[in-house]
Image: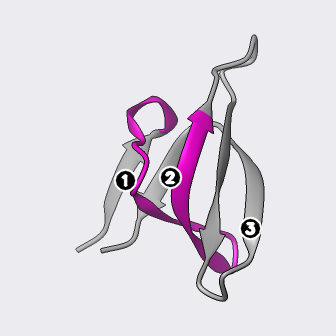
Amino acid sequence: MERYLPADKLLCGDQIALGNHTLLIRSIQGPDSFGTYDVSGVDEKGLEHYEPVNGTVRLVM
């Protein structure tokens, strides 16, 4: 079962699917004037990522 959330409902600790990797969210900033949130976190390999998120994202369970 897949679960989707709008960007404004994301919380630190959520794990989301972005492109070809997953991201465990550490921090969320925003929204900016376009409704985009800046999400930072760690992928499945332990690498730090900063991703702009706008719209709906898929949660990984």
**Count of numbered marks:** 3
How dense is the environment of label 2, judged by Cα within 10 Å: few (below 14), some, or many (20 and up)? some
Quadrant of the rendered image containing residue 58: bottom left
The crowd level at tag 3 (other Cα within 10 Å; few <14, some 14-19, many 20+) is some
The residue to which callout 3 is attached is 48
Question: Which residue is disc 2 drawn over?
Answer: 57
Q: Amino acid at mark 1?
A: Tyr
Whole-percent x, y for residue 32 in the image: 73, 17
Horizontal and vertical percent position of residue 21: 65, 79
Q: Give the residue pinned by disc 1.
A: 4
- Dividing the picture into quadrants, the one containing residue 20 is bottom right
Work out how far the residue at label 2 is from the one at label 1, CA to CA, in angstroms: 6 Å
Depicted 48 relative to depicted 43: above or below: above
How far across and down, in percent of the image, does residue 50 sit? 77, 53
Which three-letter amino acid code belongs to the residue tagged 2?
Val
Question: What's the CA distance linking mark 3 and mark 2?
Answer: 19 Å
- Residue span colored magenta: 7-28
In the rendered image, which quarter contains the C terminus?
Answer: bottom left
Depicted 59 relative to depicted 39: above or below: below
